[in-house]
Image (cartoon, grey):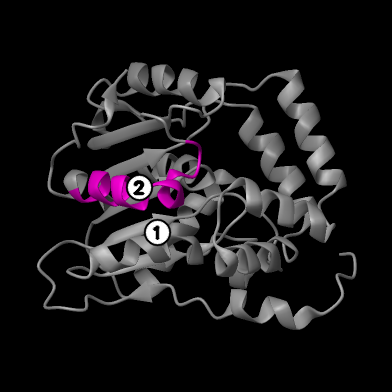
């Protein structure tokens, strides 16, 4: 990795706690939250406050957060790692899955490979459709800038993060290994519905933010064809990381889903 200057800024990204026990007497099943491809488990801080009645697990995937030094193992192995890590953290029963972007793609792999472990899945921003040559070219450009602090600061501004969020985002981004991200993007950009994913995968809510790229919207169709029971929705007016763009809407939609409902503000496809 390229030297980034003062490494003390990275310290907070390694202190993230993955298991958050219920703050009150637990009345609900646990929920596992899987982060996006330029973040780690810390990105779910805004959601933890509304999940106080259950155990919440904000995992770091291999190659991210506290595990930034690890190689990216591939989506199937990452899915297996999720279940193994949940078990090591003491959750022995079934759990709800929540994923955004890379986390959503990984969640669908978990569902395909370990359907008996999952109660329901809330997946937003998953790419299952192949992406265009233009998107691949843009990804190569981003990888060329990967170790530049200004690049991560620009990304943080684009996502609308507050000052503390920007600091954490930049610090974490500079720990991510370029070779991991190159391998990950090659795998994700190839698209494809996970083998074994389908009707037997239980309750699924698949969401595209209104301003998500076209491949994510096309992916809803692929997902719906593979799993006809899935609820397919669009988050109106939202961009990719709407968990921080509109915390209230995201949290309300998540809580509704955990109750067995779909928030009516999410529009049918």
Q: Nearer the viewer, residue 206 or 169?
A: 169
User: Which residue is rendered at x = 45% and y = 42% of the image?
Assistant: 104
Q: Is residue 73 visible?
A: no
- Image quadrant occupied by the C terminus: top left
Q: Residues in magenta?
A: 239-255
User: Which residue is rendered at x = 64% and y = 68% of the image?
Assistant: 167
- Residue 64, compared with residue 36, is above or below; it is below
- Residue 163, compared with residue 135, is above or below; it is below
Question: Left or right of 90: which side holds 6?
Answer: right
User: Which residue is rendered at x = 35% and y = 68% of the image?
Assistant: 87
Instruction: Choose top left, top right, bottom left or bottom right for residue 261.
Output: top left
User: Marks 1 and 2, Cα distance to the nearest angstrom?
Assistant: 8 Å
Q: Secondary structure at mark 1?
A: helix
- Residue 259, compared with residue 210, is above or below; it is below
Q: Secondary structure at mark 2?
A: loop
Residue 26, percent across and down?
13, 72
Residue 11, percent across and down?
66, 81
Residue 199, percent across and down?
26, 26
Among the two numbered marks 1 and 2 on one chain, the one whose residue lies closer to the N terminus: 1
Name the residue that disc number 1 marks: 83
Dot 2 surroundings within 10 Å: few (below 14), some, or many (20 or more)? some
Question: Left or right of 3: which side holds 225?
Answer: left
Residue 90 forms part of the magenta stretch: no
């Amino acid at each position: 990795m390229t030297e980034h200057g003062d490494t003390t800024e990275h310290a907070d990204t390694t202190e993230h706690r993955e298991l958050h026990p219920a703050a009150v007497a637990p009345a609900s099943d646990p929920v596992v939250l899987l982060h996006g491809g330029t973040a780690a488990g810390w990105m779910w801080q805004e959601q933890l406050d509304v999940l106080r009645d259950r155990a919440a697990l904000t995992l770091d995937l291999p190659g991210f957060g506290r595990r930034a030094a690890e190689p990216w193992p591939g989506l199937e192995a990452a899915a297996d790692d999720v279940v193994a890590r949940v078990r090591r953290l003491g959750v022995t029963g079934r759990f709800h899955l929540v994923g955004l972007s890379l986390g959503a793609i990984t969640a669908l792999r978990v569902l395909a490979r370990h359907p008996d472990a999952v109660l329901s899945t809330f997946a937003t921003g998953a790419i299952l459709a192949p992406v265009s040559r233009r998107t691949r070219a843009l990804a190569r450009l981003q990888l060329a800038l990967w170790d530049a602090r200004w690049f991560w600061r620009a990304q943080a501004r684009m996502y609308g993060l507050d000052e503390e969020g920007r600091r954490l985002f930049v610090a974490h981004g500079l720990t991510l290994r370029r070779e991991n991200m190159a391998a990950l993007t090659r795998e994700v950009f190839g698209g494809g519905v996970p083998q074994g994913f389908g009707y037997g995968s239980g309750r699924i809510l698949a969401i595209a933010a209104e301003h998500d790229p076209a491949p994510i919207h096309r992916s809803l169709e692929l997902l719906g064809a593979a799993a006809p029971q899935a609820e397919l929705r669009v988050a109106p007016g939202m961009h990719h990381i709407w968990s921080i763009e509109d915390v209230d809407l995201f949290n309300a939609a998540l809580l509704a889903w955990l109750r067995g409902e779909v928030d009516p503000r999410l529009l049918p496809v």
